[in-house]
Amino acid sequence: MKFSQFPSNVKLRIICGFFDHAAGMSVMPFMVLYIADELGKVTSGILLSVNVIFGLICGLCGGYFADRFSRKGQLVAGQLLFAVLIILMTIFIHPAINQPWLVTLFFMLTAVSNAMIFPALEALIIDSTTEEMRKSVYVTTYWTNNLATAIGTAIGGLFYKDHRIFYSSVSL
């Protein structure tokens, strides 16, 4: 099945997901480097390990809420929360303010926004596709996510070291 034959909301989800994933990948992996630079390797390793566990718990809760409540509302709330957290990270990463503990807290809270967004997006695919077209949809999503990861990390890597303030304000 071709992309043009997918339902319009699935096409929109794939296209928006590409840009969302590219933007996220241009920022989030480099936040780990920032945290390690500012707080030290051991502290950042512990915090990021806690973040993985926190993200897992949030993901389980997000899946439950996606099945029980309005998916559209959950998507909107999750995207708004993510935008607010990125804005707060941008403010507190500024060299004049530079509060790495707050940046780390906001970074960890992105697990909550992701837990609101991704289960609802996955449910959208299940609700909008037939069993025959799901393989094509997931293959397309897989490839667009891989391409977005490559593009996002390349852009983030170009800006991380020498243009941190420009980089953090562009990430919005």
Image (tube, grey):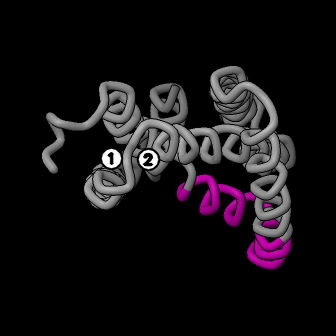
How crowded pointer 1 is (Cα within 10 Å; few <14, some 14-19, many 20+) is rated as some
Q: Secondary structure at mark 1?
A: helix
> Of callouts 2 and 1, which one flags the residue occurring earlier in the amino acid sequence?
2
x and y, in percent, of residue 38 in the image: 74, 58
Q: Secondary structure at mark 2?
A: helix
Q: Is residue 80 above or below residue 93?
A: above
Residue range highlighted in magenta: 29-49
x and y, in percent, of residue 26 in the image: 44, 47
Compared across the picture, whether 153 is left or right of 169 comes to left
Q: Which residue is mark 1?
A: 155
- Asked whether disc 2 touches disc 1, contact meaning CB atoms under 8 Å apart, the reply is yes
Q: At x 64% / y 61%, what residue is drawn? A: 32
Q: Which residue is mark 2?
A: 26
Q: Considering the whole magenta stretch, tell me its main secondary structure.
A: helix
Q: At x 60% / y 45%, what residue is drawn? A: 118
- Please check the rendered image and state whether residue 37 is part of the magenta-colored stretch, yes or no: yes
